[in-house]
Each structure stands twice: as structure tokens, then as C-alpha cells.
Amino acid sequence: MRLTDTMIGHAAQVVREMLKFAQPADAVLSNFFRANRVDSRSRAFIAETAYTVLRRRRLLEKVVGERPTPLHLVLAALVKVTGLSQRQVGEALGNDGGREASWLGELKARAEPELTLAEQADLPDWLADRLLQHMAPAAVLELSRALNQPAPLDLRVNVMKLGRDEALARVLADGINAQPCRYAPQGIRVEGRPALSKYPLYLDGTLEVQDEGSQLLGHLLAPKRGEMVVDFCAGAGGKTLALGAMMRSTGRLYAFDVAEKRLARLKPRVARSGLSNVHPVLIAGENDTKVKRLAGKIDRVLVDAPCSGLGTLRRNPDLKWRQTPESVAELTRKQADILGGASRLLKPGGRLVYATCSILPEENEGIIDAFLATHPDFVRISANEILAKQGIVIDCAAGELDMKLAPNRHGTDGFYAAVLERRK
Ligand SMILES: C[S@@+](CC[C@H](N)C(=O)[O-])C[C@H]1O[C@@H](n2cnc3c(N)ncnc32)[C@H](O)[C@@H]1O
């Protein structure tokens, strides 16, 4: 790929917008591409470079020094992280970029800065401190390095339409490099970024984009044909679709959410999937009368709780700069309330799965421990045993009941799930 000064300038423009943190990084990118016509190779460069700056912001700010400009952050990212040579970047900058080229020369000559652990991990201090409360420094570095890599693309095969092996064979025959996911029985991991929006198997609902970790949640809830199931925080329905297919389009699957826009995005996906058992319900909150009416009637409840998203930094690196100790505290209050409300839905003997894509214990086992302390009618059961019964063997700590996934150990996003059962 020939790098040009326009591409570098565009990347700096995107970085400038992203670092305002007024909008999520992916929204900044799509707005930029809507407003500026750029060819697909430049697009990939701009997106990757801007995300590299977000991922490695602390290192880059340290390297660049005081009052870093977006352009200097981009140039530093290209030579310090992407591994381009000073000459390659200098040539792209051309004659008009003489000042920046000489700045790059200076940068190259500077001694490598001393970095604190949080800077090496490229995490804000508060977040590194939280992780260090329950992890060794080497483990924090290993986890954060994995979170600072781009994520692979995982697809879930809709088994109502096609078996995983047949779908994989079709994908391979269409020239897309892919392999079965390591754990998720319906998962396919794809190499590169194929254009799915025009791909027939995607358009007809055979394939859905879903991280392998998310796919496993369905296997933890393991809904059966004919059951009454609630996806309490259904959002745009990624998990709803997987649950509906596991129920073979029978029974009733309520998709609750408080966000009308997200539920609206669920409807066309349900149509494409061919499921007829999904009932989207807009609720005002966990105390809505629509929720209360179903109290004690539901076999299985999934609570895919709103969370900090810090397990998804591979895809959403801006989250580590957007979240704060205060926003996490607010989320934990909400998580406890939602879990309390959702738990009332269960029949005796029913199963609840509480999940987040966070790596912070206060959003995960902290919520479950506090819930169990005040709800003696619930017991925690082994997530790993439920998976093992379905032939899914996850590498986990001895005696660990909850499912904890991490990119450095499992190649998935950071994920947490606990399985609770209401006593009979
Ligand atoms: C992690 S997202 C869910 C993602 C979704 N399950 C999927 O697979 O695409 C959390 C969702 O919880 C919803 N939410 C927030 N507060 C809620 C509440 N009190 N009751 C139900 N849903 C809530 C948010 O609107 C958001 O869609």
C-alpha cells in the first residue's frame, strides 16, 4: 500500500474527533467516512491507525511529549507501533511535510521513555489500580496486551438454516478464510474483514456477527423447546436470536429492553432469522408492570447486563478512556437492580444467567455475591459443568463456578457469566 500525506491527514482528523470523546469511536469513524469519500484501502488505514492511537494513547503521549497534536500522535503510532520506517512516513509526507519529517527524525533520536505499569498496559491509572487489586502485575500486562490487539471476526451459524460444517464449507468455497471457533459449537472465526453486507449467507440470516464469548452465553442458559424464556437486556437482539434458534422457534421468548431504538433494530434481524417465537417488549425498567405480570412464570432468564464494556477493548478501545470510577459505580448499582428485578421472573427450579463483557470483579462476582447474600432461595451452579455437558471445555481455574473468558487465555473478548438456579 502506498501511504500518502492525505491518508495521514485524514487519520489525524479522525483522531482529533475521537479524542474529544463526544461520541463512541466507531460513530466518529462512520461519520467521517460518510462525509469524506475515501477508497477502501485508505479507509482500512485510517481506521486501523486511529484505533492504534486509541489503544496505545498513553505510550504515544509519553513518546510525543507535552501537548501532543493528533498529527504527532498519528506519526508516532506509525513508527512506534505499526512499525513503518521513518523513511516510509517521511516519503508520504512529501516536500510540504518537511517540518513533520524533521520532527520524526527528532522523535527517533529521543531515548525510550521510562514507563509505569499503567503506561505499559496503556490503561488509565484508576483502571490499572483496580486490576492490580486482584491480579499480579505480570497478569495485568498480559491481559492488557491482549486487549490492545485488534479482535478477530466471529460469526454464528443460525442452525435453523444450516449446520455449522455446511456453512463453513460454503464460506471457504466463497474464498473467505475461516475456521471453526475453538469453543462455540456454532461459531466460525473469519480472517480479515470480508464485506458481509453483500454476502448472501449473511443477508438471508444464516450468519450473524457475534463474538465467541457471547455465543457461549446461549449454551449456559440452554433454553429448551416450548419453554418460557426472557432475554432481559435484549438490546438489538444478538443473544435473542441465538436463544430463539436453540428453542427451535417454539415456546415464548420475550426480548425486554428499555431502549426503543435498540429493540427496533432487533425486529428486522428476527425477520431475517426466520424465528417466530420472539416477542420484543419495551419496558420502562426492571419494575415495569409488564415485568411484574410474568413473575414466577419464566423457565430461564438471561441478564446480559449493561456494563463498562472493558472486556471489549479490542473492538472498543475508547471505552478505557470514557469510563471512570464514577461511571462504573453507577453501573454496578444498575446491575444489582436489574438482577434483583429479573430474578423475580423465575419459576422455582428456573435458571438465570447473569453476564457482562467486563473484566472488573465489582461488575461480575461482586454483583452475584451480594445478590446471593440477600436471596437465599437462589444457588450458584457451575457454568463450566453446564458447558462441559455440551462438549464445550473451557480452560478455567480449579473450582471456579463462573465462566470467565479473557482474550489472552481464550482468544475471545473479556466475558463473565454466572449461572443461578431458583431452589424448588
Ligand atoms: C450489554 S447490552 C445488551 C446486548 C444484547 N443482549 C445483544 O446481545 O446484542 C445491555 C442492554 O441493557 C439495556 N438496559 C439498560 N437498563 C435496563 C433495564 N433496567 N432493563 C432492561 N434492559 C436494560 C440497554 O438498553 C442495553 O441494550
Image (cartoon, rainbow, N blue to C red):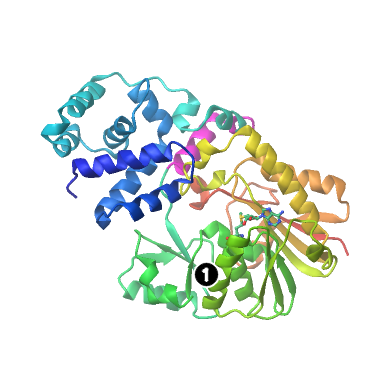
**In this rendering, is residue 7 above or below 304?**
above
Q: Quadrant of residue 193?
A: bottom left
Q: Tell me if residue 159 can be seen.
A: no
Mark 1 surroundings: few (<14), some (14-19) or many (≥20) residues within 10 A: many
The kind of residue on which mark 1 rests is: Gln
Q: Position of residue 221 (x, y in %)?
A: 68, 65
Where does the magenta region start and end?
131-148
Residue 57 painted magenta: no
Q: Residue at left 55%, top 48%? A: 414
Residue 47 vs residue 417, the one in the foreground: 47
Q: Quadrant of residue 273?
A: bottom right
Which residue carries the number 1 mark?
186
* Quadrant of the snapshot with the C terminus: bottom right
**In this rendering, is residue 329 above or below 364?**
above
Q: Residue at left 31%, top 42%? A: 11
Q: Position of residue 150 (x, y in %)?
A: 41, 48
Q: Quadrant of residue 393?
A: bottom right
Looking at the image, residue 419 sits to the left or right of residue 64; the answer is: right
